[in-house]
Image (cartoon, rainbow, N blue to C red):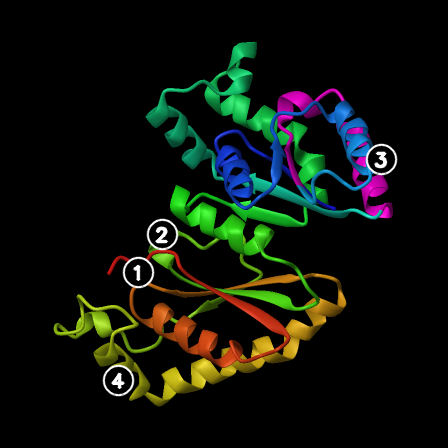
Amino acid sequence: MKLVVVSGLSGSGKTVAINTLEDNDFYCIDNMPLNMLPVCIEQFTATSPVPYEKIAIGVDARNVSQDIHAFPNIIKEFRQQDIDLELVYLEASDQTLIQRYNETGRKHPFTQKGLSLIDAIQTEKQILSEVVLLADVCIDTTSTNVRQLRSVITDRVCRNRSATLTLLLQSFGFKYSVPNDSNYVFDVRFLPNPYWEQHLRSLSGKHPEVIDYLQSHEEVRQMIASIGDFIEYWAPHFSRESRNYLSVSIGCTGGQHRSVHITEFLADRFRTSADMHVLVRHRDLKY
């Protein structure tokens, strides 16, 4: 049986995550009190045959706060059983969470305790601080829309896991911040910039004219090779440490040309590897 426990900050996308899992044939239970989790799973596993092969359970801070210190032991006990457990934690920046609550007009669960919105967010973070340390998958949704989050959940959680390493290659623009979930970040802003070529400005790093322009520069080709060699050398070390996910972010100024180009070339290099499952994300690509 596969069990996915979804937790995280209110407003970070837990409902989207649960709905996505349900669309991928998970039996989903949301907002379950933590002390009921072992009883629920025991009931499922005691039945033969197991009624559901894939179960997703949402746990939020309101249900965790009284039993938070028991959470590590609960997770440990599950992992000692014949259960394929994955703990998914969603988060976002304070500014993003505040903006989302302001836009939707919804109340944060902890504002009902007389706290301001920012204080409610900080209180929830404190309560969940032990949960995030146990997470197998941490997803920062600060710069992620609903469609992108559904895609991330599908790729990182719903996909059948194997011994292969999942390699996320993502381009981004430094002007919009560095992705918080990056294991490695490469700054390619020193490379020739197609933006300053008028006929290339409105194109992306995927366009043939931009590709030709960038590939005509030796330093671009060397940078692609160097990053690729770095990943090829160090990725096996991640696998040996039982880390099945590696996030490599490539950043230029706006996330339209250089970072996109290099990300695509790196993806082509590693897609043929039997030891990796390659995901590509262009976070800030507009055209």
Dot 2 and dot 4 residues touching (CB under 8 Å): no
Nearest-to-viewer mark from 3 and 2: 3
Residue lying at 69% horizontally and 74% vertically, measured from the top left = 236
Residue 63 sits above or below residue 222 on the image: above
The answer to if 62 sits in the magenta stretch is: yes
Q: Residue at x 51, y 82 (%)?
A: 226
The residue carrying mark 2 is: 176
Magenta segment includes 64: yes
Marks 4 and 1, the one that precedes in the sequence: 4
State the image coordinates of residue 2 (x, y, percent, origin top left): 71, 47
Q: Main secondary structure of the magenta part?
A: helix
Ranked by sequence position, the earlier of labels 3 and 4 is 3
Numbered disc 4: secondary structure: helix
Q: Amino acid at mark 4?
A: Asp
Q: Give the x, y percent position of residue 181.
A: 54, 53
Q: Which sits in the foreground, 195 or 88?
A: 88
From which residue to which does the magenta span run?
A: 55-81
> What's the CA distance linking mark 4 and mark 1?
20 Å
